[in-house]
Image (cartoon, coloured by chain):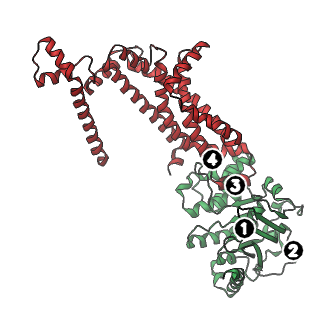
Chain colours: A red, B green
């Protein structure tokens, strides 16, 4: 523990120092100008103090961001749109729905690819091609098309998440379903087990470690997908909407607070997947 | 159908030749495996490889037959053909009068592979219960059989462990218990102890011969250890590569049916081992 604590602390301190230097450097001209306009003295210490206390800085200091985050989390009820927990929940809801949809789609595609040679040849190129389209370009299209057939709110965002999520799951599951040792397959044959039985008792459990690796990637990009999905809707709620309104009004501190919240959400969801993996695979996975 | 009686009704004690030592057999035991002019040719890029060439072999009920020979002599292939894991190019095999496929579908044999091949996500007990689940046995019956077989291989108390928590020898014993749980008449074993150290191997050989005597099963055992083959077998089939064929079939009637590690010091043991070695040497004459 101590061996790891020292480098981690050192690196964190270096990053914070770099952040403060950057904030001073970027906010300096604005701070100096503001002081001159107000007729205040412009010594080094005065400008530095002002650079760290701007209302709309180019780069806010960590303390300003944490202050904003803390104020938002503790100053309002969790159901209030001024509380970031509210927005984080809206985004998480879309991300998790999209992840569930991506899990179903990705697994079905993988099963099709593993069991049908024609599907492997015909489907795989399209699966790969789907990921070469920038999500920022296709997200508004998905919102428009689904909105046109009367689907708004959570679902368009979830579809965007699914679009991003299914790919790592398909790739991981194709590898996982094929990971069964030839001897394990021979064993199934000596028991005269059918294909369905071999799938449930052998291929599927053998693929689980691969699935969880994919899920950890997918859950993180699902959060990104949900945020991107909240931008074109001009949504009132969600971390994406919060980022958008922050940038409309030049509220950089608000944007940074929402960014920190988004990364905390991703970390939490990845930890949840890891926890689920430990519970489900548990000691069997501890090789 | 060669045997009208149900296999479980034939207890080892009721067989005519179960008396100890080299008593002459009054009546031949019924045939379990019969191979006639069995050949298997693998097509490869440059030229076809003959894994088995015109192999004739008869294995009687209650026999412990070892297939011995250098790598590439087709001993594993022969075992896999009996198990319907490979199809012969020509010739025929009958198991209890059935084709290998029929025998496999009726789950007449248990197969033990070179590696334990345990499913790592299942506990020891659930590994042994896997074939029973596929057979569709009730849960209570599955538990009872798994416990019985694990006790038989000396692994009571390890039911809830995962394979990686066991040593290599213990894992291979689990895989033997798993094959026995099917209650097959025929046990096919492909170098099951090949990857183990000699001390563990001696121990497991002793265990296996006791198990064989207690259950009266027919065993076909692939090995490349002469000592192991002589120690375990009632008959030894010496094979040679390129093309895979049978050179010699040696009866081990000179040795008692009940075996302890001491018999390895007897002149009878040495004589049989010598004959096996001579057979293997003959097979190697192609080596210039």
SS at circle 4: loop
Position of A149 relative to B152 (above/below): above
| Residue B106 visible within the image | yes
Q: Chain of mark 1?
A: B
Residue B108 horizontal/vertical position (percent): 79, 58
Q: Chain of mark 3?
A: A
Position of A217 relative to B165 (above/below): above
Name the residue that disc number 1 marks.
B214
Name the residue that disc number 2 marks.
B28
B196 relative position to A116: left or right:
left
- Badge 3 crowding class, 10 Å Cα cut-off, few under 14, some 14 to 19, many 20 or more, is some
Query: Is circle 4 on the same chain as circle 1?
Result: no
B62 relative position to A69: left or right:
right
In front of the other: A267 or B88: B88
Q: Are marks 2 and 3 in contact (CB under 8 Å)?
A: no
How far is disc 3 from disc 1 in space, using C-alphas?
28 Å
Q: Are marks 4 and 3 in contact (CB under 8 Å)?
A: no
Name the residue that disc number 3 marks.
A186
In front of the other: B265 or A188: A188
How far is disc 1 from disc 2 in space, using C-alphas?
21 Å
Which residue appears at 27% of the width and 27% of the height? A62
Residue A234 horizontal/vertical position (percent): 46, 14
Which residue appears at 27% of the width and 45% of the height? A6
SS at circle 3: helix
Name the residue that disc number 4 marks.
A178
Q: Give the image quarter of residue A22.
A: top left
Q: Nearer the viewer, mark 4 or mark 3?
A: 4
Q: Nearer the viewer, mark 2 or mark 3?
A: 3
How far is disc 4 from disc 1 in space, using C-alphas?
40 Å
């Amino acid at each position: 523990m101590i061996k790891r604590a020292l480098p981690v602390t050192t690196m964190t301190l270096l990053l914070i120092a770099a952040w403060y230097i950057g904030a001073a450097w970027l906010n300096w001209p604005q701070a100096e100008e503001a002081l001159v306009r107000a007729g205040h003295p412009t010594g080094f210490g005065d400008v530095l103090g002002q650079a760290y206390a701007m209302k709309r800085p180019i780069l806010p200091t960590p303390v300003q961001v944490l202050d904003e985050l803390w104020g938002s989390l503790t100053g309002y009820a969790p159901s209030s749109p001024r509380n970031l927990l509210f927005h984080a929940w809206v985004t998480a809801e879309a991300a998790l729905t999209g992840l569930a949809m991506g899990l179903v789609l990705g697994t079905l595609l993988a099963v099709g690819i593993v069991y049908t040679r024609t599907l492997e040849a015909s489907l795989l190129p399209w699966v790969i091609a789907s990921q070469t389209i920038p999500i920022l370009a296709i997200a508004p299209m998905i919102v428009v098309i689904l909105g046109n057939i009367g689907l708004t709110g959570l679902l368009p965002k979830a579809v965007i998440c699914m679009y991003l999520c299914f790919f790592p799951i398909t790739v991981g599951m194709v590898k996982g379903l094929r990971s069964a040792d030839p001897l394990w397959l021979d064993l199934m044959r000596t028991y005269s087990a059918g294909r369905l039985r071999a799938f449930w008792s052998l291929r599927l459990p053998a693929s689980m470690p691969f699935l969880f690796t994919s899920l950890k990637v997918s859950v993180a990009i699902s959060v990104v997908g949900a945020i991107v999905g909240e931008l074109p809707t001009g949504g009132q709620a969600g971390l994406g909407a919060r980022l958008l309104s922050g940038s409309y009004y030049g509220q950089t501190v608000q944007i940074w607070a929402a960014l920190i919240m988004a990364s905390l959400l991703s970390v939490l969801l990845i930890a949840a997947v890891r926890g689920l993996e430990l519970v489900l695979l548990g000691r069997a996975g501890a090789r | 159908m060669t045997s009208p009686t149900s296999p479980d009704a034939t207890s080892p004690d009721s067989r005519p030749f179960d008396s100890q030592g080299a008593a002459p057999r009054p009546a031949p035991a019924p045939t379990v495996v019969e191979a006639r002019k069995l050949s298997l040719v693998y097509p490869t890029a440059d030229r076809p490889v003959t894994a088995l060439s015109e192999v004739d072999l008869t294995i009687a009920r209650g026999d412990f037959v070892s297939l011995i020979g250098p790598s590439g002599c087709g001993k594993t292939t022969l075992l896999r053909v009996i198990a319907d894991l490979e199809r012969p190019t020509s010739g025929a095999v009958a198991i209890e009068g059935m084709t290998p496929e029929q025998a496999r579908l009726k789950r007449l044999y248990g197969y033990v592979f070179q590696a334990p091949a345990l499913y790592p996500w299942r506990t020891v007990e659930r590994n042994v219960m896997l074939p029973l689940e596929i057979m569709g046995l009730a849960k209570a019956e599955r538990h009872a059989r798994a416990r019985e077989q694990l006790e038989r291989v000396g692994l009571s108390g390890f039911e809830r462990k995962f394979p990686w928590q066991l040593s290599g020898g213990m894992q291979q014993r689990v895989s033997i218990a798993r094959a026995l749980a099917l209650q097959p008449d025929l046990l096919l074993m492909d170098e099951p102890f090949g990857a183990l150290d000699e001390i563990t191997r001696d121990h497991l050989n002793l265990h296996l011969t006791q198990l064989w005597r207690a259950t009266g099963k027919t065993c076909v055992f692939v090995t490349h250890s002469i000592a192991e083959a002589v120690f375990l077998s009632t008959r030894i089939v010496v094979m040679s590569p390129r093309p895979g064929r049978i050179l010699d079939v040696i009866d081990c009637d000179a040795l008692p049916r009940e075996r302890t590690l001491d018999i390895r010091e007897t002149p009878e043991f040495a004589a049989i081992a010598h004959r096996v070695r001579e057979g293997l040497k003959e097979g190697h004459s192609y080596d210039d």
